Image: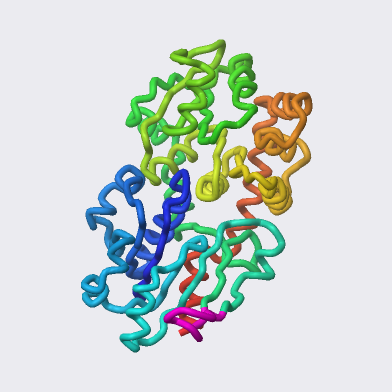
Amino acid sequence: MLWDIFCRVIDNFGDLGVCWRLSADLAARGQCVRLWVDDGAALQWMAPGAVEGDWPGVQVLPWEQSCLAQTLQSLPPADVWIEAFGCDIPLPFVAHRVIAGDKRPAWINLEYLSAEHYVERSHGLASPIMSGPAKGWTKSFFYPGFTPKTGGLLREPDLMERMAQAAPAPERARFLAALGLPWQGERLVSLFCYEPAMLKNLLLHLADLPTPTRLLVTAGRATAAVRALMGDQTERGNLRLSFLPGLTQLDFDRLLWHADVNFVRGEDSVLRALWAGKPFVWQVYAQDDGAHGAKLEAFLDRMEFSPALRQLHQAWNGLLPGSEADAALASRQPQALAQWQAEVLAARSRLLKMDDLASQLVAFVRNKR
């Protein structure tokens, strides 16, 4: 089938990251995708060759062209429309399809990932269009999620196999060498974050541990946050800092596979950390109304994490008083890593039994058609 996926880059490239992973996953399964995006600059480092058309099965198109009659007349009609995260498909694009009288596409509003209970209630619901050129048509809400009553989670069919192939120690050393990292056997901790209040405490904690740690700091806001605290220092106590370049999505995945502990943020990276099966801490995107607290608690419930691990997540997200947050951080001593990883692997094992997001989308659309 031919899919039109519409994406607006709101902040931090998370929306684009999810839409690109979905597009690439669908294409790998034999689908054809046109990805319409209002700012595809991040794809230059996230998925090199994508904008230039070098990615089989995916065509990246500028958002503004979806409003041009000349462009619309030259494109075959798609079987599926996906408006990602509530972005509205441009009215000229919709009107062209209505006027042409082509068969109605399966029109899907792909929502943000959440573990909250409303996801099960809302997944798959129809939304009649009450005005505009497509009045009388219907959209469907599609909610990714962590239970069989939702749309599942993004996961490529060969992901676990690729992870297993990358597991041997020589592969880890080769990956780190390719990034130019002076690794000498230290514990590896990856850091992909916003600006958590507990960041200074984390740096001090890692510096004081008896086991040497190399902190792999991702480009962008994480690097800026660490440099604001450390200046030009790259060493403190038993802590060594390595500042990474912008990574492709595939290399970011490998980073999570090879690190011993992963600090991640946002929707896309928490799933990649979960599939990696390593100890991780998730920083939820903070919202002014405090809704991120409920989102985090629902996620922790679905993961069935122990109280100590729950408190660590709460501390990292600024949801615990200072003294409790310090205690939660200190509780994650090196000897606790095995139990931490066991909890992550147990959650992953449960979720691997579910059909993934792309599989469910394809089945949902075929049923609609």
Q: Quadrant of residue 150?
A: bottom right
Instruction: Identify the residue at horizontal 30%, vertical 45% (top origin).
Output: 44
Image location of residue 130, percent across then percent down? 54, 81
The relative height of residue 295 versus residue 282 in the rendered view (above or below) is below
Which colouring convention does the figure follow? Answer: rainbow
Question: Quadrant location of residue 247?
Answer: top left
Work out whether residue 95 or residue 81 is closer to the camera in this orientation and state it.
95
- Place of residue 73 in the rendered image (x, y in percent of width and height, measured from the top left): 23, 77
x 51%, y 65%: residue: 110
The residue most toward the front is: 131
Horizontally, residue 74 falls left or right of residue 314, namely left
Residue 146, quarter of the rendered image: bottom right
Q: Residue at x 48, y 40 (%)?
A: 257
Vertical position of residue 31 compared to residue 319: above or below: below
Q: Is residue 287 left or right of residue 253?
A: right
Instruction: Pick the quarter of the image with the C terminus.
Output: bottom left
**Image: 298 above or below 125:** above
Q: Say left or right for 147 vs 47.
A: right
Most common SS among magenta residues: loop
Q: Residue farthest to the top?
A: 237
- Residue 226 location (% of width, % of height): 51, 24
Task: Decide which of 1, 111 is in the foreground and name it.
Answer: 111
Residue segment shown in magenta: 128-138
Quadrant where the N terminus sits is: bottom left
In the image shown, does 192 or 170 lie closer to the viewer?
192
Q: Is residue 277 magenta?
A: no
Q: Is residue 128 above or below residue 114?
A: below
Q: Is residue 132 magenta?
A: yes
Residue found 56% across the figure and 35% down from its top: 263
x and y percent of residue 23 in the render? 39, 61
